[in-house]
Amino acid sequence: MKNVRYKTVLITGAASGIGYYTALEFARARAELILTDVNEKDLKKTADKCEKLGANVLTYVVDVSDRGQVGHMARDIDKKNLSVDILINNAGIGYLGDFCETSYDTWESLVNVNVWGTLHHVYAFLPGMIKKGQGQIVNVSSGQAFFRLPTWGAYTVTKLASGGFSEILHYELAPLGIKVTTVYPYLVNTHFYDTMSTDTFGAKMVKKYMHFFANEPQTVARKVFRAAVKGKRIEMVNVFNYVGYYMRFIPFVPCIVSKVAYWFLGKTPEALGAPKRPGRCAAFKKMVRERRLGFSLDEVMTGEHEFAPGHGPDGKKFMEFRANWGTRHITKWLNPWSRDFMSNHLSGTVTIEGLCKDAPMKGKLELKYFTERKLRYTFAFDVDGKKYEYTGEKVNLWPWNLPVTHTTCYGTLRLAGTDKVVSRSITYFRFCTMPAFLLSTRLC
C-alpha cells in the first residue's frame, strides 16, 4: 500500500463491477482517485463510498469511446495540476451471438469501447507519464483471449486486440520507466452479462448458473490492485485461464472445445436461415422425444446413526440405504425451467440398526448444485405402522472438493408430519463401490 499512497489513480468503468471494487481497494490504500463512467448516478455512489474510506475523489461522466470527451477530461485534470500515476482501463462491454447475426453497429460499439476506449486513455495520459519518467498502465482484457469460443467471436476479437496491444506496450514503455500490466479476468459475477442475448438453451443455462463458476468482482479487484502495486506484467486471475492458454499448444484440444461449445451455445442452421437438414443425431433425438428416454443408477450409502433421547438405545449404530435413482424424462431433467430439473425419483431399502432392516422406501434425490451447492436425499418408509421421513444432504459442493463433499451425507430422521427428530446420521459413499455404481448406469 505504501506504493500507491497519495498517488493519483484513474479508473474507468468505476460505477459497478470490477471497477467499483477496484476503486474501493485503492481508496483503502489512501490513493487519490479519479473515477469515470457513463452512469452518473452509480458513479456518485462509488465516489461517496470511497470518500467514506478516506480517499479524495474526483469524478467525470465520460464515454470512453468518445475521443473528444476523454481529451477534454485529460485537459481538465491537467488544469487542476494533477497527473495520473496509475491508469486502469477497466471499462468494457460484452456480447454473445453468432457472427451471422452480429450487426455492424454491434461491432462498432464493441471496438469503440473495448479497443478505442483503451487507446484514447493511453494516448491522453501517456505523455505525462513519459515526462515524469514513471507510471503504471493496467489494461483489463478477458480470459476469452485464450478460450476463443464460438458465439463470443466479436467480443473475443476486441479483447484479443486490447490484450495483444497491452502486452506489446509493456516492452515498448519499460525503457521509459513505465510499467504496463495486462489483466485477464475469467468469468465474473457482475451485471456485465445482463445485456447479452440468450436465445439458445445453452446460453440460458450458462447465464442462469454462471455464478457457480464465476469469480466474484471483489476477488478480481483485489488481484487488479495487487498486480498494479507489484507492477506485474501479466495477471491471469483464475487458474482456468492457464488451462485456456496451455491447451492451445495441443492442436486437437481447441478444436474439440470449440465444437462442443458451439453445439451447446450456438443456434441451429435453421434458426440462422439455412435449409433444414437431417442431423446425425436425429434418431437419438426422436427417441428422447417419443420414448421419454431416461437413466437410472444404483447407489449404496453406509455409515452410522445415533438415536435422539427416548427413541432408541444409546450409542452409535449402523445405518445403510440402497437407492436406485434417476429420471424417466431426460429432457425435463436438463431443463432449468422444468419442475423436474435435476430432480430424480428414488427407491430402494434402508437399514437403521435398532429400528428397521431393509425397509422399502421411496422419495427423491435433488441435485441442487447451482442454486444451493447441495445434493439432497428425501425418502419415506414405514416401520410397525409408523411412518418416518429421512432427509440427507451432501453440502458445500465446490469443484475443488467434490471427492470429499460427494461422499459424505448428513441425515436427519423424523416422524412423518412432525418435527420430532428420531435419529441423526452420517453416511458415506465408499470408493470401493464406485465400479458397481458406474456399471449400474442404464437407459430406461
Image (cartoon, helix red, strand yellow):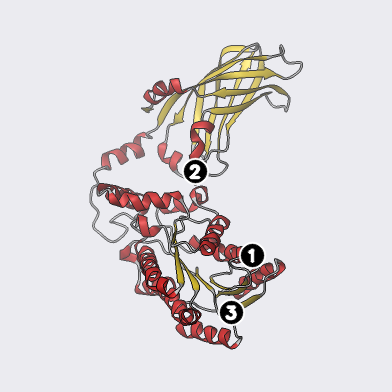
From the image, tell me which residue sits under label 1: 29
Assess whether mark 1 and mark 2 are in contact (beta carbons under 8 angstroms). Answer: no
Percent position of residue 214, x then y = 50, 52
At label 1, counting other C-alpha atoms closer than 10 Å, the crowd grade (few under 14, some 14-19, many 20 or more) is many
Determine if residue 66 is in view.
no
Camera-near label (2 vs 1) is 1
User: Does residue 414 lie above or below 179 as drawn?
Assistant: above
Q: Is residue 117 left or right of residue 84?
A: left
Q: Which mark is residue 254?
A: none
Assess whether mark 3 and mark 2 are in contact (beta carbons under 8 angstroms). Answer: no
Name the kind of residue labelled 3 in the image: Tyr
From the image, tell me which residue sits under label 3: 60
Name the kind of residue labelled 1 in the image: Ala
Q: List the single residue furthest toward the right.
A: 310
**Which residue is at the front of the view, 59 or 224?**
224
Q: In which quarter of the image is residue 142?
A: bottom left
Percent position of residue 302, x then y = 54, 19
From the image, tell me which residue sits under label 2: 338
At label 2, counting other C-alpha atoms closer than 10 Å, the crowd grade (few under 14, some 14-19, many 20 or more) is few
Name the kind of residue labelled 2 in the image: Ser
Residue for point 30% across, 52% down: 248
Q: Quadrant of the N terminus?
A: bottom right
Cα separation between marks 2 and 3: 46 Å
Q: Is residue 99 left or right of residue 358?
A: left
Percent position of residue 211, x then y = 52, 51
User: Does residue 189 lie above or below 126 as drawn?
Assistant: above
User: Does residue 434 lie above or below 164 as drawn?
Assistant: above
Mark 1 or 3, nearer chain start: 1
Determine if residue 414 is in view.
yes
Mark 2 or 3, nearer chain start: 3
Mark 2 or 1, nearer chain start: 1
Q: Quadrant of the C terminus?
A: top left
